[in-house]
Amino acid sequence: MAGKYEARNTQGDHRVLDDDPKAIALLKEEHRIFRKLFDRAEKAEGADLKAVADELCLRLTVHMTIEEEILYPALKPVIGADEVDEGIVEHASGKRIIAELEQLKGTEELFKSKVHVLGEETIHHIDEEDEDLFADAKEAHAKGRIDLDAVGDDMRARQAQLYRQVEETGEVGVTCETDADEIAHV
């Protein structure tokens, strides 16, 4: 039985559709994984919770990187800054929690609560993307204003590169994400 987040994977705009351009299909596939993992985290304890949290932190870091390096800059001039900038600010919040989680052993009193809050914030963010951002992006794609298949190819290649980097070094490595300090100073 699907948990409270995973159940959304088969509902409405959260489904991967046959006519979704490659960029949207890739991100929706990732969103499905996040919903499953956050449901697992809700039930997990101890070492199991730490393992799920570690996987979430890594996957979210890669996911946010490909959005910020490739998707958001491509979308911003096409659909406007509002939705893109909101996504960047939401990412900054998630990155702060991820940085905290990565410093913890998993046995700390607030560890599970931090994972839960990361889940609530992430699910809110990906639901908004599925329901709003992707609809606007898909419309722009249909009108020929952006090629989300080419963007998707670039995102998938960068994603693979980041995961290879992790396999080789244990780190994501240098990225060109939005500078969170910029957000803090606005």
Image (cartoon, grey):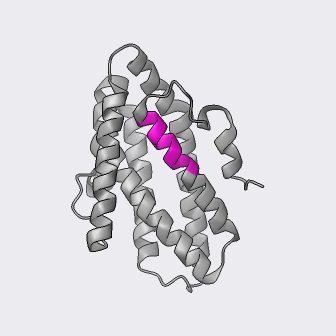
Q: In this view, does 72 lie above or below 89?
A: above
Could you tell me residue 134's position as x and y percent? 48, 31
For this view, does 133 lie left or right of residue 124? left
For this view, does 67 lie left or right of residue 128? left
Question: Does 9 lie within the magenta span?
Answer: no
What predominant SS class does the magenta segment belong to?
A: helix
- For the magenta stretch, what is the residue range? 23-32
Could you tell me residue 21's position as x and y percent? 44, 28
Q: Is residue 77 above or below residue 50?
A: above
Is residue 159 at least partly visible in the picture?
Answer: yes
Q: In which quarter of the image is residue 44?
A: bottom right
Of residue 92 and residue 115, the one placed in the foreground of this image is 115
Question: Does 26 lie within the magenta span?
Answer: yes
How many marks the image carries: the answer is 0
Is residue 110 at least partly visible in the picture?
Answer: no
Q: Quadrant of the N terminus?
A: bottom right
For this view, does 121 lie left or right of residue 184? right
Could you tell me residue 57's position as x and y percent? 45, 65
Q: Residue at x 40, y 49 (%)?
A: 89
Q: Quadrant of residue 137?
A: top left
Could you tell me residue 60's position as x and y percent? 44, 57
Q: Residue at x 27, y 55 (%)?
A: 161
Of residue 18 and residue 83, the one placed in the foreground of this image is 18
Q: Residue at x 58, y 63 (%)?
A: 117
Q: Residue furthest right?
A: 1
Q: Which residue is drawn at 51% across and 24% down?
A: 19
Q: Quadrant of residue 82?
A: top left
